[in-house]
Image: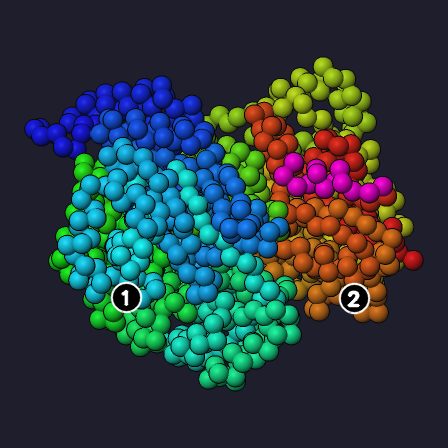
Amino acid sequence: MVDAQQSGPGPTPRDDINARTELVYALRKAVRGEVSDTSIRRAEYSTDASNYRVVPQVVVIPKDTDDARAAIETTQQHGVPLTTRGAGTSCAGNSIGPGVVIDFSRHVNKVLDIDPEQRIARVEPGTIMGTLQQAAKPHGLRFGPDPSTQNRATLGGMIGNNACGPHAVAYGRTSDNVVSLDVIDGRGQSYTAGTNGQGIDRIPGLGELVTANLATLRTEFGRFGRQVSGYSLEHLLPENDRNLAKMLAGTEGTLVSILEATVRLVPIADAPTLVVLGYPDMATAADAVPGFLKHRPLAVEGLDARLVEVVRRAKGANNVPDLPPGGGWMMVEVGGSTAEEAMDNARVIARDSGTTAYTIYPAGPEATKMWQIRADGAGLAGRTASGAQAWPGWEDSAVPPERLGDYLRDLDDLMQDYNVDGMPYGHFGDGCVHLRIDLPLNDDGNTLKRFMTDAAHLVAQYGGSLSGEHGDGRARSQLLSVMYSPASIGLFRTVKGLFDPKGMMNPGVLVDPDPIDAHLRRPAAAPLPATSGFSFMHDDGDMTKAIHRCVGVGKCRADNMSTHAGFMCPSYQATKDEKDSTRGRARVLQEMANGSLVTGGWRSPEVHEALDLCLSCKACSSDCPAGVDMAQFKSEVLYRSYKGRLRPRSHYILGWLPRWLRLIKRIPSIANFMLKFRPIARLAAVTGGMDTRRSFPQFANQSFSAWWKKEGHTQLAGSVTQASAPTTVAERGGPTVVLWTDSFSDALAPAVPKAALKVLTAAGYNVIIPEDDACCGLTWITTGQLDGAKRQLSNLLSVLGPFAVNGIPIVGLEPSCTAVLRSDLVDLFPDDPRAHAVSTATHTLAELLTSEDTKPENWNIPDLSDVTAVVQPHCHQHSVMGFTADENLLKQGGATVRTMSGCCGLAGNFGMEKGHYEVSVAVAENMLLPALREASEGDIFMTDGFSCRTQVQDLMDINGRSLSEVLADHLN
């Protein structure tokens, strides 16, 4: 790697390696934080939330601001390109670079000070916006702009892109809320940029440049609020207080690196109330925007009806509030000094809306659901209504709000010309449209480039901007000449030269930009067609398409648990390492498909390191708006890596656990007695590849199946039948249901199916117990032994299939096993109608007892008013079946429950395996263990997950109770 200004022959690969070695040595000498040039770390930072892939030479994760300064200075001394990065959620490719990438988000992330009287805050660049909001809230303050990624986006990144969000219509852009910035520019100069010309004198020639170009600056810049593309040089005008801090907002790291920011805070709005208004289509909805703006709303957002339908299909109707009719909706938020005043203001909005289809939501769960749909827009829109992959690129255009309706009509015509589709949404009050389009990117970027060029000309005709808040990055910088005159483009180049004469600050962006179709990630990825493992039926049988579901929005990095927004991603919350996020793992898998950086295919050490701390909790399959299922990817990788090869010991012990349980349940007392002796238990753990700090669960002295054969069938002969087919079931009246007892419940927790039998018979069900055992193959799936899993599931289909195809409900008790039948079963057997029938017929106990189709007549939920419980939904239940039915049943029974978010940390075999203990415990400490410590005497711990009960028993010596046991205990 050589200085970009050096002339002569280009560097050889050996020169590059030597230069990188020297750079890494110098950085490690100067920086106390992490300096890495490993292929896995470079893979994690090779892309952001854009279409682009640029592999860095080195990744630096500084410990503090001084560390970051040292990293910047060392990088500049070596003449190497520098890209600073926050959460990496940029949609335009402006947080990736070919040299050194510095990640501020992990450590340089503190709120340094809040001055409630001055209403300002000092923050480090890696501070998550949500962290600032939490710190300001006790003072009745907040930061105004709030992008949808606010629970993981950093203030440094927001300043770099000039982010806005829904409430920018009331509070302005990030640039409007910046007071001052402490920066280092491309010359290595440090200074504070602020208002009244502060800092301008530190850049020789900048003041003179402004004076010489006043006419251009006054006519081409700052024409409307969301003109974010290019450099916002209008802030340097005398009438705008020559504000260098505001001008640097939106420069995308091409001029300076930010080390500290002082930002303005605003009062939290009182009584926010949401009005949702229905229109025939999005363009008609946009026509209504000017009428809303005269009422000074807090937010004006557009939402395509097809986007809401994606949520309804993916997450269930209960996650979508009742909406007024329409093909598109406007979400208008208003405030007031009281709830009554806010409601009056909402009615005024509705009166002037031009539609009679509207619903008003006061602050509460329904309004929260609407805002969650809006917040998840970037991920949800990653697939069109037809399921095609949709991409960013033209995802952030903006026009003056009064022209938005006509612009959307012409944009729709342009998409029809290209035979592409997308679902528009966004900040319609500011004229900003977010739109991901199913442009063909599998092979090349030709269509992308042609469409983007035509779209740029269209937005320019409307006096608009290529970008309204995401910045131009690699996605749009090449098109700035369509929007700006040659004089303005020349100004950009001159400004860049003043701040960064060597062109080392985030090269390829804004000035001397990379071509739109250069460095595209998707065309460089080879297909990974399905073989004999998972079918990837939702991704056309191609794992490459599946792993590219990850669009990089980074919700897996957010603290979803403390806000009860989901369970994802437990390992990242434990380590705060990008490697351990769903996105980081997806990036390494994408590099595996690319093959140029991660070169070992399925057996690549980088791939297995990235997947090692994945708990296979499946939370990402539901919480990730793009529907990434990392548990499935991990299983497939293990399958292809070890097929026909010797596996880790734990795969044979824990992966074959149901097989061993069938043997142990013949001699449970002997097994329990032997494992009481620590040396024997330790030897067993070492032999099985398990952590010796773990305790073995107790094997039941009598399994459920043994109890049934010995005495249960006679005790319950009047209401329970053991049968192999529906034709052999006795007619007793009442609804018929199959009670499926999984391997864990049978051998380790027989009290659970016994209690379920008691509840089902008391409710009037005619219960069937299958004559033959039926294992779901869960442990084979999680260890990637998919051939073995298929054998187990094939047997299960022969046992449960006859009941399912005849429409008889099946009740599962262990959530992880029930989830296999509801999800993985169909993907492993996509062409077997029995698999689809079993999946459809399978219910949790709570679903069976509360669903209109299956609930019993003349039966009431027992009185649970004496129950106060800490309730831990199993991750797989949260992800696949959902926990709503359980929560509603408990509350209808009068129980007081505190429902946890997040994984217990054991996650089946994960927490038992050697090397995972610390992370397993750290995950439990995210929420579950603290909640149990805070519980009052007499409170109980409830969970249906055997692994959840095992984790708490092992770490806190607390016995957990299943739903069936609690219900059975309270039967009259």
Mark 2 sits on what residue? 856
The image quadrant that residue 788 belongs to is top right
Instruction: Indicate the position of residue 156 as horizontal and vertical percent values.
Output: 40, 44
Camera-side residue: 325 or 843? 325
**Amino acid type at image mark 1:** Arg
CB atoms of marks 2 and 1 within 8 Å: no
Q: What scheme was used to colour the molecule?
A: rainbow
Label 2 SS = loop
Q: Is residue 466 visible?
A: no
Is residue 842 at least partly visible in the picture?
yes
How many numbered tags mark residues here?
2
Residue at figure coordinates x 44%, y 76% from the top left: 294
- The numbered dot on residue 223 is 1
Which stretch did the figure color magenta? 925-937
* Left or right of 400 on screen, residue 767: right
What x and y, as percent, mark residue 548?
A: 38, 49
Q: Indicate whether residue 385 is drawn in magenta.
A: no
Q: Residue at x 13, y 57 (%)?
A: 487
Residue 283, position as x, y percentages in the image: 37, 76
Determine whether 33 is above or below 227 in the image: above
Secondary element type, mark 1: loop
Extreme left residue here? 8
Magenta region, main secondary structure: helix
Disc 2 packing (10 Å; few <14; some 14–19; many ≥20): some
Q: Quadrant of residue 889?
A: bottom right
What residue is at 35 percent from the left and 40 percent from the top? 192
Mark with earlier residue (2, 1): 1
Answer with left or right where residue 660 lies relative to residue 67: right
Q: List x then y, in percent, for residue 641.
A: 43, 33
